[in-house]
Image (cartoon, rainbow, N blue to C red):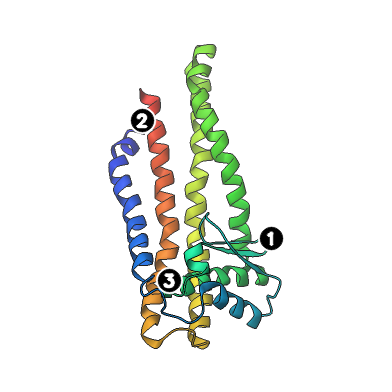
Amino acid sequence: MRLLILLAPLLLLVAWAPGLWVRHIMRKYHQPPDRYAGNGAELARDILDRHGLHKVRIETTKDGDHFDPESCTIRLSPENHDGHSLTAVTVAAHEVGHALQHAEGYAPLRMRSYLVCVAGYGQQIGAWLLVAIPFVTIIARHPAPAILFLLAGVLSMGLAALVHFITLPTEFDASFRRAMPILRDGKYLHPPDYPHAERILKAAAYTYLSQSLLSLLNIARWFRYLRR
């Protein structure tokens, strides 16, 4: 526990660094804004139709680019849905990669969807358990109940970190086994842009690494709170 608390500043630095790099990469390749004739949504629609996925919808969202397997919908941020930049079309192709995974019954994607739901409930339960620790200790007049609550809280909150780590292989599969080959085979990009598109796809994947580290940092913060 003490080690985790001592490492909290280092975790903060490590967690924030990938996020800053991701934002830098995404912003960099949003220029020039008129790099391609079609926008991200149009490219996604073309790829989906070529693979027979006519029922997959494409919508705009303010909640971040993602594929929703329950409604079979690709949701893109406004700048990627309507944008004509390299970032816009590459991110759109990445989300199409997830739609292809879903259509093929890709097991890691199904597992991720299940774990995301479990982690959401787990985090809520974990937070309530951790808040209840001081009250349980006072009522029971014994540290044992508090220890049990602490273990349950840490385990449930740790699910978020686990989900993000498990997500990494799924993201790399969507990017480099599906999106990148499709972009190359379909000659969707200008030839000099392919190495830059790979950087964008790596940035999209490492977003989840950053989120995982931030989840661990969240646990460290709870430890610091409990020590007061």
Alpha-carbon neighbours of circle 3 within 10 Å: few (<14), some, or many (≥20)? many
Please identify the quarter of the rendering in which residue 96 is found: bottom right
Separation of residues labelled 3 and 1 (CA atoms)? 25 Å
Among numbered discs 3 and 1, the one appearing first in the sequence: 1
Alpha-carbon neighbours of circle 2 within 10 Å: few (<14), some, or many (≥20)? some
Residue identified by numbered label 3 = 87
Q: Secondary structure at mark 3?
A: helix
Separation of residues labelled 3 and 2 (CA atoms)? 39 Å
Residue at 52 percent of width and 52 percent of height: 163
Kindly identify the amino acid type of the residue bearing the numbered disc 3: Thr
Kindly identify the amino acid type of the residue bearing the numbered disc 2: Arg
Residue at 38 percent of width and 66 percent of height: 26
Among numbered discs 2 and 1, the one appearing first in the sequence: 1
> Residue 219, position in %: x, y?
42, 38
Pointers 3 and 1 in contact (C-beta within 8 Å): no
Residue identified by numbered label 1 = 71
Residue at 47 percent of width and 48 percent of height: 161
Name the disc covering residue 224, or none: 2
Quarter the N terminus occupies: top left
Q: Is residue 188 above or below residue 154?
A: below
Q: Secondary structure at mark 2?
A: helix
Separation of residues labelled 2 and 1 (CA atoms)? 40 Å
Kindly identify the amino acid type of the residue bearing the numbered disc 1: Ser
> Residue 113, position in %: x, y?
61, 56
Among numbered discs 3 and 2, the one appearing first in the sequence: 3
Please identify the quarter of the rendering in which residue 156 is found: top right
User: Mark 3 or mark 2, which is nearer to you?
Assistant: 3
